[in-house]
Image: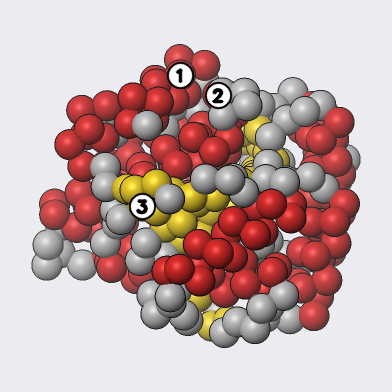
Amino acid sequence: MIDTCIDLLNKTKENKPLVHHITNYVTANDCANVTLEIGASPIMADDIEEVLEITAVSDSVVINTGTLNCKTLKSMFLSGKMANKKNIPVIFDPVGVGATRFRNDAVMKFIKEVNASVVRGNISEIKFIAGVDSKIKGVDAFESYFVDIEHTKKIAKEIAQELNCVVAISGAVDVISNGNKIICIKNGHSSLRGLTGTGCMCSSLIGSLCGATKNQNFEATITAMLCMGIAGELAHKNTKNLGNGSFHIAIHNSISTMNGKIFKEMARFYEE
């Protein structure tokens, strides 16, 4: 698996896929930068007048509901359906679902009408999609670091089977399933919890890797999640006692210098 991950990293830098984001204004800059840092090219177009044209020439689409509004919601549906028509991977990040009726209705409607290639969220968000009670605190998972890993694996696999996609659940241990296999990633650091947007950045990394490689969405998602986890560990190591601002910059530095040697030395995961 490590060799596959390294190959995907290299292909992303070689192919420079165009990744269309309809994301939130809180983390858009970070998402654009990690897309560049991993070797892809971001475009952050959300106006309804151009979204179809942009999607049609993109290699992947990342849809993020962090700062959802009626205007961008229409663009999300148009982009998602165009991507399906063109066989372009759709990465769906249902940020904050479970918090309000508007957000809940929008997310569930999107899942029904658009075929997502990858759904990534925290345990609260994925549990809501699964129809299981969850605790939402802002857009963060109140329970993300206090969950039964076996329960998380079960939910990931079941939702992946139901939606016929890859499901990635971020947490103390990241869980990824394609409905058949389950991968658990142990990389990461608790400091990531103190920085907003790391989940959104994960989704952008997934979109970048999926856009560079066709029909390897599971492997691309694993690679992206490993990348963020390893970056978190490296950033903490390099900024001890310096605070969140330095940690934030170090995350970007770590992603932009990620390579096969680092992956081989630091990746920690196991397969079910």
Quadrant position of residue 42: top right
Q: Is residue 86 above or below residue 62?
A: above
**What whole-number distance in Å separates the C-alpha atoms at marks 2 and 3?**
22 Å
Q: Is residue 185 left or right of residue 111?
A: left
The residue beneath circle 3 is 185
| Residue plotted at (28% across, 68% down) | 190
CA distance for labels 1 and 2: 6 Å
What residue sits 46% from the left and 19% below the top?
11
Q: Which residue is mark 1?
A: 11
For the N terminus, give its image quadrant: top left
Residue 55 visible in this rendered orientation of the protein: yes
Residue farthest to the top? 14
Residue type, mark 3 in image: Ile
Callout 2 amino acid? Ala
Q: Secondary structure at mark 2?
A: helix
Between residue 256 and residue 177, name the one nearer to us: 177
Distance in Å between CA atoms under marks 3 and 1: 22 Å
Determine whether the residue tagged by mark 1 lies in a helix, strand or loop: helix
Which residue shows up at 50% across the image and 71% down it?
A: 151
**What residue do we see at 55% from left, 24% from top?**
212
Mark toward the start of the polypeptide (1 vs 2): 1
Residue nearest the viewer, comparing 88 with 184: 184
Query: Where is residue 127 shown, x and y percent of the image?
Result: 62, 72
Q: Position of residue 231 (x, y in %)?
A: 29, 47
The mark that comes first in sequence, 2 or 3, is 3
